[in-house]
């Protein structure tokens, strides 16, 4: 077997120092385009490439970014986190990491063992992307002293002083409620929220309260039901909501605003089983704009958030922090938009265009980067 070429031979043939060869091969700076061309040509001719281990030692990087999520398993038959949402975040994170030449290590935290797992993952990674509910704020602060941490919740990021990526929950949800009250004239709205400790659910319910108050309606102090951000949880929450209303001698709400699409899909199933027509008897809306929202019948009116971009932006934030650890805290808020489909009552009579994808018309974007 022939001996492998060395960096010294590449340096000698291209007429530069070994340090310059390293900078060129690592896409660094401090050399001319002509030097770059010579080094790359010499490396190609000698069939030389830098060792991944050596490159990692030189940069003090492992080339791995960790993603921590709440456990995707089940607890008492209730899923802890929406798997469809998490899947899209992971896809976006993997895409951004691959573009930077990094790998992604995925782990799910649960209960008291979550902190130990997070510390173990941190020891193997250059930085971490953490879904807000995967760890408490004290543990996030501890991890941030060891490696760069980016949390997927702008609100948590502000409290913990770590980099954060979130979405404009409030503008999107307020726009949705305004549509239900002003365009359709609904006055009896119920809100099905996610987990009580979810920053996204808290923000969306706050926006719901703002929206109904702006319409001159009573703003409830708490969500009408908790569906846990899952399809099964949403089904149970809406079934309980309907039972409570019946026990009180009240009719079903005219519109059910769900904190995410999966709970809304669960709501559609329960309403159908109780022979309540959507949107004729009860309108239903979601939040996320997952693919399933276009394919259920009736197609789901929802608030779209750029889920894959959330994961990608979080990885880019980790990479930026690795490049400049002293930079000011970074907070990115991605825009949302209301997507109108059949489940809210939008038909030709309201002047909304139907498409083959599912009676869809999209409003303008709301929100901004910060």
Image (cartoon, helix red, strand yellow):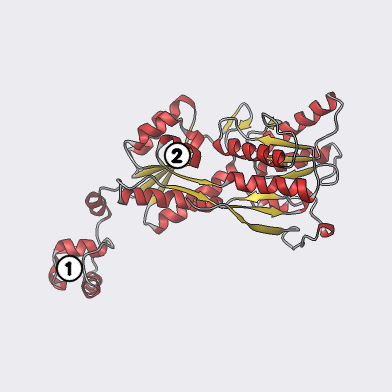
Decide if residue 89 is on the left or right side of residue 60.
right
Residue 76 visible (yes or no): yes
Position of residue 3 measured from the top left corner of the image (x, y, whole percent): 18, 63
Q: Secondary structure at mark 2?
A: helix
Position of residue 162 measured from the top left corner of the image (x, y, whole percent): 40, 40
| Residue neighbourhood size for the residue with mark 2, other residues' Cα within 10 Å, grouped as few (<14), some (14–19), many (≥20) | many
Q: Residue at image x 36%, y 56%? A: 101
Check disc 1 and report the residue beneath it: 10
Q: CA distance from mark 1 to mark 2?
A: 46 Å
Q: Which mark is residue 157?
A: 2
Residue 287 visible (yes or no): no
Q: Secondary structure at mark 1?
A: helix
Q: Residue at image x 60%, y 32%? A: 195
Q: Are marks 1 and 2 in contact (CB under 8 Å)?
A: no
Decide if residue 250 is on the left or right side of residue 299.
right
| Residue neighbourhood size for the residue with mark 1, other residues' Cα within 10 Å, grouped as few (<14), some (14–19), many (≥20) | many
């Amino acid at each position: 077997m022939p001996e492998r070429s060395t960096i010294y031979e590449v340096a000698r043939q291209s007429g530069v120092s070994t340090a310059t060869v390293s900078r060129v091969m690592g896409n660094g700076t401090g050399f001319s385009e002509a030097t770059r061309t010579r080094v790359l040509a010499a490396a190609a001719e000698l069939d030389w490439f830098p060792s991944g281990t050596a490159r990692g030692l030189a940069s003090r990087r492992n080339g791995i970014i960790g993603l921590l999520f709440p456990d995707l398993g089940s607890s008492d038959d209730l899923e802890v986190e929406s798997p469809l949402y998490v899947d899209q975040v992971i896809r976006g994170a993997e895409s951004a990491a691959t573009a930077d030449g990094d790998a992604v290590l995925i782990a799910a935290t649960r209960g008291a063992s979550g902190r130990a797992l997070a510390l173990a993952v941190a020891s193997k990674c250059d930085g971490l992307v953490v879904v807000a509910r995967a760890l408490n704020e004290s543990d996030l602060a501890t991890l941030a002293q060891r490696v760069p941490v980016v949390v997927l919740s702008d609100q948590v990021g502000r409290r913990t002083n770590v980099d954060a990526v979130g979405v404009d929950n409030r503008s999107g949800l307020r726009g949705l409620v305004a549509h239900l009250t002003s365009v359709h004239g609904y006055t009896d709205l119920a809100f099905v929220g996610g987990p009580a400790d979810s920053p996204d659910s808290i923000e969306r319910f706050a926006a719901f309260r703002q929206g109904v108050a702006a319409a001159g309606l009573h703003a409830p102090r708490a969500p009408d039901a908790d569906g846990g951000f899952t399809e099964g949880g949403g089904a149970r929450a809406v079934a309980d909501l309907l039972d409570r209303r019946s026990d009180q001698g009240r009719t079903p709400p005219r519109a059910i605003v769900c904190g995410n699409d999966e709970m809304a899909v669960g709501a559609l199933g329960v309403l159908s089983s109780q022979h309540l027509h959507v949107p004729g008897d009860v309108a239903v809306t979601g939040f996320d704009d997952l693919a399933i929202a276009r394919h259920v019948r009736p197609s789901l009116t929802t608030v779209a958030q750029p889920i894959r971009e959330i994961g990608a932006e979080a990885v880019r934030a980790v990479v930026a922090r690795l490049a400049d650890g002293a930079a000011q805290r970074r907070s990115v808020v991605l825009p949302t938009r209301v997507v109108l489909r059949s489940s809210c009552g939008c038909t030709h009579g309201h002047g909304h265009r139907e498409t083959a994808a599912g009676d869809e018309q999209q409003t303008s974007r709301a929100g901004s980067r910060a």
